[in-house]
Image (cartoon, rainbow, N blue to C red):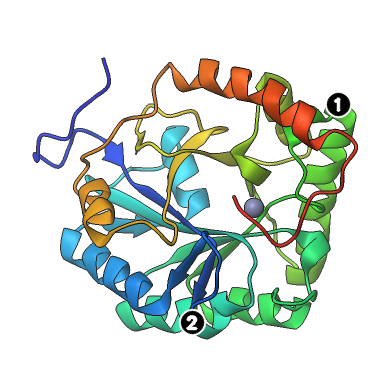
Amino acid sequence: MPPSDTGSGTSGLVPVLLYHSVSATRRDDPWQVSADDFRADMTAVVASGRTPLTATRYAAALRGEAELPARPVLITFDDGFADFADEALPILTGLGLPATLFVTTGWIGTTGMLSAAAIGDLAAAGPVEIGAHSVTHPHLDLLGRRAARDEAGASRGALEDLLGRPVTAFAFPHGSHRRQTVAAVRAAGFAAAFAVKNALSHRADDPFAIARYTVHAASTRGQVAAVLAGDGPAAWGGERLITTAYRAVRFARHRGRPVPHPFAV
Ligand SMILES: [Zn+2]
């Protein structure tokens, strides 16, 4: 049975929020969250009394190498949109919240995405951990093990060259992964990997498939508050079968076609 958050603060359900673009100007983008909504969510994070952790610190706790606070929370971003620096970072900094940004390295400096200099500034400025999110944002579970390892490893290498420090956390593009994908990411030298699942993580979660909850344009503040309260499905069991079935659909859909950019998850 999944653990449940009884309010005791010790049951171990962990919200790992996933954002993409945060913008003051509304675009027709289902994955974008307005700056006002993001500020409301981050204010709710503070009000929740949870302890915000970076990806690496949380993964170390899952591996038993570090103490896990009683009520952790993680704030993560995928892809590396330029508006992270302009819109999200001031809100995070103002509230004293650390976050983790997973960067698609092949998109660095392209339209709407962070530049290399901006990513360097983020890492130097403070409470933002930089993780990797592949080079070209493919469905890694549709690639062979060597190609998947190369995608993960090349994104890690590019960021380590840019930052001059180890990059140990990875996020699967689209959340797509299977056993072979996890092995490829481990072989590429990562110590942790984040999935999607739209479920709550927990202290027994797999450090190479950590569950996250996507906040998108249609998400309500009430839904985010519920997740922060530990009220939601925990990452156990059944999603693996759903992921496997969906893989066949995605394989047929994406085979031989370029992946659109920028886009979701
Ligand atoms: Zn992505």
Q: Which residue is mark 2?
A: 87
Q: Position of residue 39 (x, y in %)?
A: 33, 75
232 and 252: which is toward the camera: 252
Q: Please rate how many residues cluster around mark 1, counting C-alpha atoms within 10 Å: few if below 14, some from 14 to 19, many from 20.
A: few
Left/right placement of residue 50 relative to residue 199 reads: left
Residue shown at 19% from the left, 29% from the top: 4
Give the amino acid type for the residue marked by disc 2 in the picture. Glu
Q: Which residue is mark 1?
A: 144
User: Mark 1 belongs to which amino acid?
Assistant: Gly
Disc 1 or 2, which lies upstream in sequence? 2
Please indicate, yes or no, whether residue 218 appears anywhere in the rendered image.
Answer: yes
Whole-number angstrom distance, CA of label 1 to CA of label 2: 37 Å
Check the image and report above or below for 160 versus 64: below
Residue 11, percent from left and from top: 19, 33
Counting from the top left corner in percent of width and height, residue 253 is at 76, 33
| Tag 1–tag 2 contact (CB < 8 Å) | no
Task: Please state, as top left, top right, bottom left or bottom right, where the N terminus lies in the image.
Answer: top left
Secondary structure under the numbered disc 1 in the rendered image: loop
- Other residues around mark 2 within 10 Å, as few (<14) / some (14–19) / many (≥20): some
Q: Can residue 96 be seen in the rendering of this structure?
A: no
Across and down, in percent, residue 200 comes to 34, 38
